[in-house]
Amino acid sequence: MPLALLALAIGAFGIGTTEFVIMGVLPQVADDFGVTIPTAGWLVSGYALGVVIGAPLLTALGTKVSRKKMLMFLMALFVVGNALSAASPSFGVMLIGRITASLAHGAFFGIGSVVAADLVAPEKKASAISLMFMGLTVANIVGVPGGTYIGQAAGWRVTFTVVAALGIVGLLGVARLVPEMGRPQTENVRTEFAAFRNVQVWLAMAMTVLGYGGVFAAITYITPMMTEVAGYTEGAVTWLLVLFGVGMFLGNLLGGRFADRALMPMLFATLAALTAALLLFTATAHNKVLAAITLSLIGALGFATVPPLQKWVLDQASAAPTLASAANIGAFNLGNALAAWLGGIVIAAGLGYTAPNWVGALLSGTALLLAFLAAHLDRRTRAAGHVVASPGSEDLPAAVRH
């Protein structure tokens, strides 16, 4: 695999750390600013919504420059946002810092996915994408637990200072290792938006919102769930996040490998198993050993859906993939925001810290139904022998094209 994938993984490591580390220090942040846990959950939802907005906006603006320059700009924006979070004097400023950092997230992974796929042979695209996302999963093994430990020992502000430094390392990695690939002559905002004429692109994003949203419904409130329900000490949350990260790492690798062989069957299996695991977590959260095992399993099953969903979007929008790819990353975080919000509602309603698991199971189960629908439409389109009608609208049924 090209060395440039390492640079993309480094950037993904920094972004993954800041996205997930907030869960490990959420109680400390809430206490420091004098807000409730559900209110502090807006630091998760706000970040996710920032990704949703920033992904298409910055990607569209980025069509005017080379992909490498855009990746460097995004990492610089990420550094600024985390530095602001670290120095925030109030909860409102902290939220602004989180949103600023999040604006870089979707566009980085969206553009990075296209770059990663372009660097390898067609039959290795999902594997290349999974290697870039490996930085995100490694962040959950090293960066997030490490950041949580730092936050508990030295304060959450130090955690975000370290994350800003990680962003600087990611910026230097992109500058040094990613080749100057230029900007495709056919790439512009108009052709990029043409990809959204394909109903399969919308279905893929809906699967992304609901499928990975199921994971976030549980993981957003994992600290109070493990300490108040399972009976772990606050310090044990660090190694519990390591287990979750290990699950994500393994799920990402398996998802990339099997998506290159049988994409939709891989989605069916992982979404069904994820739904079952989230339902099971409602019961296993009351036992320390079973809670740890289930947490790791949820991480593996949740992230096993990422490479196949991202590849599905790239396949369906192959003529103009950049904006669709970034929009799908935004969809992941729209699901995160929705799940964090719904999880906060059921907790605030007095249903307990395990109630978000039911929300997650409902979201992931709905994603499974959409996966069956997408596969059915794809088979019907292929059987009818339809061809691409316009750039970015591959496999588009006649009813949709007209």
Image: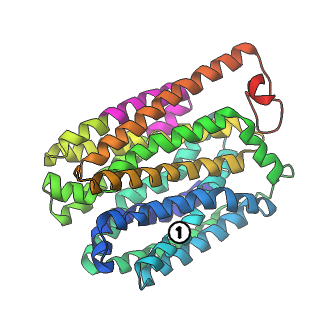
Q: Main secondary structure of the magenta part?
A: helix
Left or right, 94 with reference to 198: left
Q: Quadrant of residue 69?
A: bottom right
Q: Amino acid under label 1?
A: Ile
Q: Which image quarter is the C terminus in? A: top right
**14 or 39, which lies in front?**
39
201 to 143, vertically: above or below: above
**36 or 375, which lies in front?**
36
**369 or 264, which lies in front?**
369
* Magenta stretch encompasses residue 261: yes
Residue 220 can be seen in this image: yes
Residue placed under numbered mark 1 in the picture: 99
Residue 266 can be seen in this image: no
**78 or 67, which lies in front?**
78
Q: Residue furthest top?
A: 383
Q: Which residues are magenta?
A: 254-276
